[in-house]
Amino acid sequence: MSVRAKLSAMMFLQFFIWGAWYTTIAVYMTHHGMGTLTHWPYTVNPIAAIAAPFFLGLIADRYFATEKVLGVLHVLGGVVMLVVPQATGAPTLFIVLLLIYNLCYMPTLGLANSLAFHHIQSQEQQFPFIRVFGTVGWIVAGLFISYVLGPLSGAVAEQTPLPIYSTAIASLILGLFSFTLPHTPPPGAGQRVSLRAILGLDALKQLGDRAFYVFIAASLLLCIPLAAYYNFTQIFLGDAGVTKIAATQTWGQISETGFMLLMPLFFARLGVKKMLLLGMGAWVLRYGLFAIAAPSAIFPLIFIGIVLHGVCYDFFFVTGQIYVDKKSTPAVRGQAQGFLVLVTYGVGMLIGAQIAGNVYTRMLGGATTMTLDRWPSFWVLPAGFAAVVLILFALLFPAPKPEVRG
């Protein structure tokens, strides 16, 4: 198998794992009497993302080959996820086990990206065609849950533990496969260990300029409303009468695949700033469509909001990963990617999950499910927040300097 094929398979399994549980766990918890606690999986996930740079800085960047660390973490995560359904009747233990699992999984996001970047020559041209297989993995996870596990279980698959077990098995497979990935030596071998390096502050100092600081601030702020999508879209779809929830949400990843393949063209035509602005604007539009569609459960508008995920994710998050890598040197590449994970999937998503969870719980008003007439009041909040971030970014992020050709 070629290096590119191995990297693509790694990305496929990496995001199959995440998609299998992340888009179904809130439905599972609601069905098993934990409906007011559904924001906690989306809280422990960013807590783990905050902890990830410490692990990457202490272990992965200095002492062990990246592919070996990736393998061990996925095997450990798979074992933990096998135990999670056994704790369904004990909510605290259930959430603690998810925290332990995420402490294994979240460092692998930065590891997978840095490993892929280490073995390619052109970030803009090659990385999207490797990363797109991650999106395909997320799509396959959703379709597998709705169209394979659903008939197999004879029920709504998201309400059963089968998606969790699917995550566990895929984690074990990727863990073993990781040991066959191209050798990637620790980039920080022999360097002095410091808290600044672990947190990515050394990378921040090297990369820091006005544009980078504005980008990091916008990334953090945009992830606050982003948390509402991952946590509550699956519940919103259920309230709107959708039965194949996971499969419906995969249309967002199908859209993501198309835009991912077009990213090299968009980079050449638009540049970083315009792509980031379009990504932010898509988040505002998506939440606005959800708010308009909610009272009458207008599925076409909901569907358009889901399909917008391609622009939402690719034009902001994947563009951001490439932007950070282009500004990095090999010595701080892992730190820089880890710092980006800390800011976005860590601090931003942690704040967002708690805010969205508390807003949702208050809107329930003692009920077990949200009525459709209340959902517009919920979705308009992340729409307005994302709009403010968009405006601030447009004003503060400097326009790129024109390229001078000899």
Image (spheres, rainbow, N blue to C red):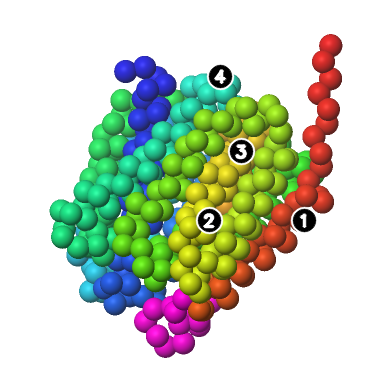
Q: Earlier in the sequence, mark 3 or mark 1?
A: 3
Q: Amino acid at mark 3?
A: Thr
Classify 10 Å Cα crowding around label 3: few (below 14), some (14-19), many (20 and above).
Answer: many
- Residue 121 is tagged as 4
Q: How far across and down, in percent of the image, does residue 164 sit?
A: 26, 55
Q: How far across and down, in percent of the image, does residue 284 sit?
A: 64, 58
Report the residue marked by disc 1: 392
CA gap, disc 3 and disc 4: 17 Å
Q: Amino acid at mark 1?
A: Leu
Q: Amino acid at mark 4?
A: Gln
Which label lies toward us, 2 or 4? 2
CA gap, disc 2 and disc 4: 35 Å
Asked whether residue 69 appears in the rendered view, the answer is no
CA gap, disc 2 and disc 3: 20 Å
Which label lies toward us, 3 or 4? 3
The residue at 40%/85% (across/down) is 367
Helix, strand or loop at label 3? It is helix
The magenta span reads: 358-372
Classify 10 Å Cα crowding around label 2: few (below 14), some (14-19), many (20 and above).
Answer: many
**Residue 368 lies in the magenta-colored region:** yes
162 sits to left or right of 343? left
Which label lies toward us, 1 or 2? 2
CA gap, disc 3 and disc 1: 18 Å
Q: How far across and down, in percent of the image, does residue 337 sit?
A: 56, 40
The residue at 30%/66% (across/down) is 28
Report the residue marked by disc 3: 319
Question: Quick check: marks 2 and 3 in contact, CB under 8 Å?
Answer: no
- Residue 305 is tagged as 2
Q: Nearer the viewer, residue 112 or 329?
A: 112
